[in-house]
Amino acid sequence: MNDPYEKLKRLKKSLPTGVMSAADLLRQKEEEPLPEYPDMTAFIPGEVRECEAGTCFVADEIFPFNDFIGNYPIERLQSLQSSNLLKTFDLEEGENPEGPILFVDTETTGLAGGTGTFAFQVGVGWIEEEGFRVLQFFMRDYDEEPGQMAMIGELFSKASMLVTYNGGTFDLPLLRTRFVFNRVRVPLMEIPHLDLLPVARRLWKTQHGRANLSFLEEKILEDVREGDVPGSLIPSLYFQFTRGASPRTMVPVFYHNRMDIVALAALTEKALTCHREPESIENEWERLGVARFHEKRGREQVASEILAPLRRTEIDPDCWHLAARTQAMLCKKLGDLDRALDLWWEVFHHGPFDPLVYIELAKHLEHKSKDLDEAKQVVFTVFEKYGIEPDPETDEGESLFGDDLELDSGPKYDYSEGVRGWRDDLPSRYVDEDPDQVGSPKSVFSPPRLTARFQKELNRRYARLLRKLRAT
């Protein structure tokens, strides 16, 4: 009566109709046929690949070196070396310096990230002897994710570095989460990673106003996609596919992902060439972007030499304005105040109104030239440009700009609060402290909005000049 096997038999007989024991349920699951997936090969060249973790569909395409993407010859990709990318963009070498450079782009079920977001397609491109190869790992349903992640993880483990577009904040964190969920061990944090988005912003956004990948492909590579799909529609197309829609639904998604990877590789090569050979840059906006790259890394002398050839009468007026104010601040940091002063006066007389330049001139006139009348007039002009009256009764306090010409990190005045204070007849383009945040390109610049903090500092400077003039 105490035999446990007899008790289990009695319990099994007492189960309600339709209820199965765990052992029978597992046995039935093992006997179930594999799920039937739609045939992708009828519309997309590729094959189903299998590993220990499972299966997924893999599309495979090679772009031969004699091919072009827009006006860009694919053969130029042969010059890409991970050592050059790592050195140029200040990245540390990884464990596989001889491995391939992998260009990675994902298509996901949403942009929220987190555990509920899947990378249903991961495209990976690299350079081979025959050309530029692109593999696209696609899960036909969610149960193919273990196989998909295992195959991608094996590929990543051999890479010398990864290149993405906004991958630092989206693609790689998402892949890291999916690797963990599928128990795929990939030292993702130890693989050198270049996110090309900040580089592209400095090189091309200021001129063109936008920096999304497909837009730059059209503007920089002069390639117009045919049969593409907007990225915002891609998740819904995948949901339709998983609910039974034809594999034809995914054809534009594969095309979009594939062209993103090829464009990413081409723009990476162009960006690397600009940074390694700045003397060969013909586009003044790209030259300005490279100079800013070096400036942010404390290489003021290199940045100054890159900007030196630019002349006001030979380049785009907007570019000259930004280049001149950047060059002036570089000269100030390097101790060449005479050259900085010449540039500030040139912008003052020939460029649009720029508060940074006016304030720097006022500081120099007050502390170095001792021309207090001229310094007061320059500060008063700033009030006039914004259409407000000075208030010299403002109390003295800690200066926002500083009272001397010591080498500092550049302009620190704040444009982040307050209301727009410029007059309607002022030009319409912003001049922003952050070069990555300059808005859409227009013909001329306008001053930043007037903030309460900025106005208070102007009043302090104006009051101090008045007191000095009375004292003399």
Image (tube, rainbow, N blue to C red):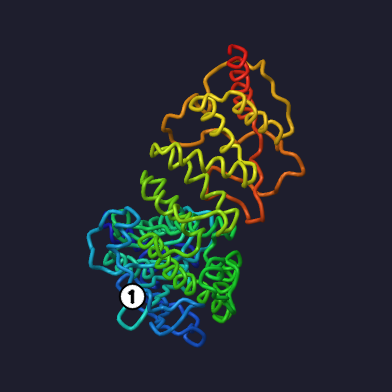
Say which of 193 and 190 sits in front. 193
Say which residue appears at 42% left-offset and 67% top-offset: 270
Q: Position of residue 255 (x, y in %)?
A: 52, 77
Q: Name the residue at 62% across, 47% down.
A: 350
Residue drawn 65% across the image and 48% down it? 445
Reading the image, the residue beneath label 1 is 78
Neighbour class for label 1 at 10 Å: few (<14), some, many (≥20)?
some
Image quadrant where residue 456 sits: top right
Amino acid type at circle 1 is Gln
- Please identify the residue farthest to the top as the structure is shown: 471
The image quadrant where one finds the N terminus is: bottom left
Q: Would you place residue 275 above or below residue 409 in this image?
A: below
Q: Residue 183: percent from the left, percent from the top?
A: 32, 59
Q: Between residues 158 and 345, which one lies in front from this camera angle?
A: 345
Where residue 7 appears, as percent x and y from the top left, is: 33, 58
Q: Relative to 438, does residue 132 appear above or below in the rendering?
A: below
Q: Position of residue 464 (x, y in %)?
A: 59, 18
Q: Quadrant of residue 87?
A: bottom left
Per the image, label 1 sits on a secondary structure element best described as helix
In the rendered image of this protein, does residue 338 appear above or below residue 128? above
